Amino acid sequence: MIKFTLNGRIVETDAPPTARLLDLIRDEFELIGTKEGCGEGECGACSVFVNNLLQNSCLIPIGAIAGADIQTIEGIMETEQFKLLDESYSNAGGVQCGYCIPGMIMASAALLSNNPHPTEAEIRDGISGNLCRCTGYNMIVDAINLAAKKGDGLWQKK
């Protein structure tokens, strides 16, 4: 039995330790905001926080998360940071098909938590592990820049 915290709740699973965290999140816990894109850690659609670090859940065997704190997009949806990012993405037109957006939001939150006032180059670097086939990235960069400007003080680490 593997025990860990998922979105603030202690959970356990008897899934094989070699199973992917992505599959566990989606199949056993029915948290479908985390997506499978490439399955190789290249696209960022499966991004989650593992002990507050942005990780690709498609690359993590669940045996490696015993005792860890895992946060998915569903886990951050009630935060003020998410509300600001959601509004900023909407206002900047940064959402089209929406498939990449949970991972982009996770990458945006990770970036702004570590660098509340990034330059455009730092924003582009911060989302470089996430692929989007719809927007061409400019509107996503604009959204993150908008969130940085509007969220002064919101991104301070607690």
Image (spheres, helix red, strand yellow):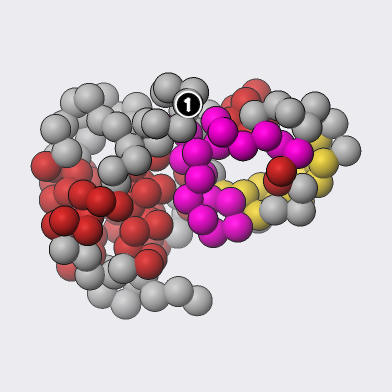
Which residue appears at 84% of the width and 31% of the height? Answer: 14
The answer to whether residue 27 is above or below residue 154 is above
Q: State which quadrant residue 95 falls in.
A: top left
Q: In the structure shown, which secondary structural element does the residue marked by tag 1 occupy?
A: loop
Tell me: 63 left or right of 156. right
Tell me: 158 left or right of 153. right
Q: State which quadrant residue 101 falls in.
A: top left
Which residue appears at 42% of the width and 23% of the height? Answer: 37
Q: Is residue 101 magenta?
A: no
The answer to whether residue 33 of the structure is visible from this angle is no
Tell me: 68 left or right of 51. right
Q: Where is residue 86 in the image (x, y as percent from the top left)?
A: 30, 48
The answer to whether residue 97 is above or below residue 62 is above
Give the class, few, some or many, for how many residues have Cα within 10 Å of label 1's Cα (few <14, many ≥20).
Answer: few
Q: Position of residue 75 (x, y in %)?
A: 54, 49
The residue identified by callout 1 is: 40
Q: Where is residue 56 in the image (x, y as percent from the top left)?
A: 50, 39
Which residue appears at 40% of the width and 57% of the height? Answer: 110
Q: Three-letter amino acid code at disc 1?
A: Glu
- Which quarter of the image is occupied by the N terminus? top right
Q: State which quadrant residue 123 falls in.
A: bottom left
User: How many marks can you see?
Assistant: 1
The answer to whether residue 129 is above or below residue 124 is above
Q: Is residue 57 magenta?
A: yes
Segment colored magenta? 45-63
Q: Which of 35 and 128 is in front in this view?
A: 128
The answer to whether residue 14 is above or below residue 73 is above
Q: Where is residue 70 in the image (x, y as percent from the top left)?
A: 62, 49
